Image: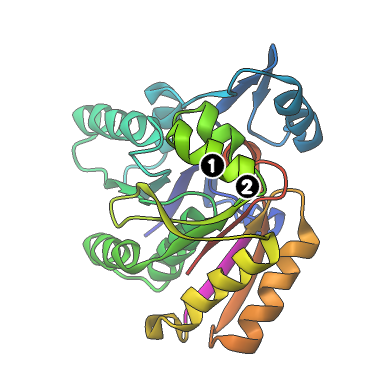
Amino acid sequence: MGFKIVVDSCCDLTGQMLKDPRFIKVPLTIRSNGSSFIDNETFDQADLLWAMKQSEEAPSTACPSPQSYLDAYQGPEEEDVYVVTLSALLSGSHNSAEQARMLMEEDHPNKNVYVFNSCSASSGEVLVALKVRELAESGAPFKHVVREVEQFIYQMQTMFVLETLENLRKNGRLTRLQSVITGALKIKLLMGATPEGEICKLGQTLSMKQALSKMVDHMANDPAHAGRTLAICHCNCLDRAFQVKAMAEQRCKFAHILILEAGGITSVYANDGGIVTAY
């Protein structure tokens, strides 16, 4: 039985992963400082980071249309389609993917399509997509894959530390007061995601180094991390990603550690210097 995994472009798969033809990426679009960026292989991170620095306005993002998802779902009737999207609380991408699934079911009632709300972004989406591939490759039935991956999502942890909270503030993802305080005192916040996929604060420190260390403390103190894969996504700060990897190797018991590069949507939210982890 064939399968494919459709992801939105906040799923920061590596170039090597994207060589697997079973991964299909549906891009979101970003507008900043009068320029438009399609979050696909043409995306230029340096151009976007520059545009965001120049602009007083928040960058805006547009999720894929249901038709874009529907096009990605097309294929042989017997091919299972698994879809992984950004947290439904952060983007309309999940809603578009669901609308496309309903349209597909009308015309192809026997075709299996399931849309996973990752309740995460970036690194978290990558881990979900890889889990889907692992289970589907093993020959597990469609419903079994769905059940196991939903359980995986429920147990997954997402954390991030940002150099600047400016874009989250401009986008209304943080209260203005919180960002003013952190901006004035140069405080670095350790942020996470609730099980529902909402952004929450886990702690604060005076420096990026302390914040990253606190992030790894959280991992080390969570006994459930042992044996899992840690995904570290960086926005234009590879050295920082390697620092987190080194700390995690020293203090944690992860089976594998992946380093990922931020695509367009992750760059909007993480901004220059941001780190997003999931396990």
- Point 61% across, 50% down: residue: 162
Question: How many angstroms separate mark 1 from mark 2 (CA)?
Answer: 6 Å
Is residue 207 or residue 34 the one in the foreground? Answer: 207
The residue stretch that appears in magenta: 228-232
Residue bearing the label numbered 1: 181
Residue 165 picture location, percent across and down: 58, 41
Residue 154 appears in which quarter of the rendering? bottom left
Is residue 272 or residue 118 the one in the foreground? Answer: 272
- Point 29% across, 57% down: residue: 195
Residue 179 picture location, percent across and down: 53, 38
- What label does residue 109 carry, if any? none
- Secondary structure at numbered mark 2: helix
Residue 11 picture location, percent across and down: 53, 48
In the image, residue 60 above or below residue 194: above
- Point 71% across, 79% down: residue: 246
Callout 1–callout 2 Cβ contact below 8 Å: yes
- Point 33% across, 67% down: residue: 152
- Secondary structure at numbered mark 1: helix
From the viewer's perspective, tell me whether residue 167 is left or right of residue 85: right
Is residue 97 visible in the rendered structure shown here? yes
Residue bearing the label numbered 2: 185
231 part of magenta stretch: yes
